[in-house]
Image (spheres, rainbow, N blue to C red):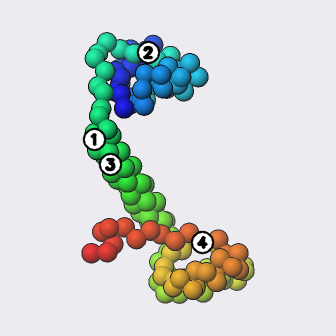
Amino acid sequence: MIKFSLNCDNGHDFEAWFRDSGDYETQRKRGLLECPTCGSSHVSKGLMAPNVTTAAKREEVAVAIGHAMQREVVEKMRAMAREVRKSGEDVGTRFPEEARKIHYGESDPRGIYGKATPDEVSSLLDEGVEILPLPDLPEDLN
């Protein structure tokens, strides 16, 4: 892996990792490089000595990237769950019954959330009831 200092035509500086210098050139020629600040695709290398990683460091980089992605995904799930809970009605264990009533027009459409067993979720999906299970977040398990 190699890290380059890059800059865009609007004067923004940033860094990016590439498999090798050929990978950078390929992405640049195909217009795949983009400034994370302004979105400009006119990107070039800045002045710096490239940071080359060894095989041992590649695993550390992959783990660090994985942890960062995991944190980002968990934060997005938290935001989604907060929004559902803020705008929806908690129907508790009546969720399967209420979801069916809404689906079949027996109750006014509204956002709901609650509890359902795996079998109840499977049955709802088989019936075509549109549901999305909320994720179990780390803080929910405490």
| Disc 4/disc 3 C-alpha distance (Å) | 33 Å
Which residue is found at the position 50% from the left and 19% from the top?
25
Name the N-terminal-most of marks 4 and 3.
3
- Residue 40 visible to an observer of this rendering: no
Is the C-beta separation of discs 2 and 4 under 8 Å? Answer: no
| Quadrant occupied by the C terminus | bottom left
- Indicate the position of residue 11 as horizontal and vertical percent values: 38, 14
User: Which of 86/140 is in front?
Assistant: 140
In the picture of the structure, the residue carrying the numbered disc 1 is: 56
**Where 89 sits versus 3, above or below?**
below
Q: Residues within 10 Å of mark 1 (few under 14, many from 20)?
A: few
Q: Judge depth for marks 3 and 1 and give the one in front.
A: 1
Determine whether the residue tagged by mark 3 lies in a helix, strand or loop: helix
Is the C-beta separation of discs 4 and 1 under 8 Å? Answer: no
Q: Judge depth for marks 4 and 1 and give the one in front.
A: 1
User: Which of 27/119 is in front?
Assistant: 27
| Disc 1/disc 2 C-alpha distance (Å) | 28 Å
In the picture of the structure, the residue carrying the numbered disc 2 is: 44
In the picture of the structure, the residue carrying the numbered disc 3 is: 63
In the picture of the structure, the residue carrying the numbered disc 4 is: 131
Determine whether the residue tagged by mark 1 lies in a helix, strand or loop: helix
Q: Amino acid at mark 1?
A: Ala
Q: Judge depth for marks 3 and 2 and give the one in front.
A: 3
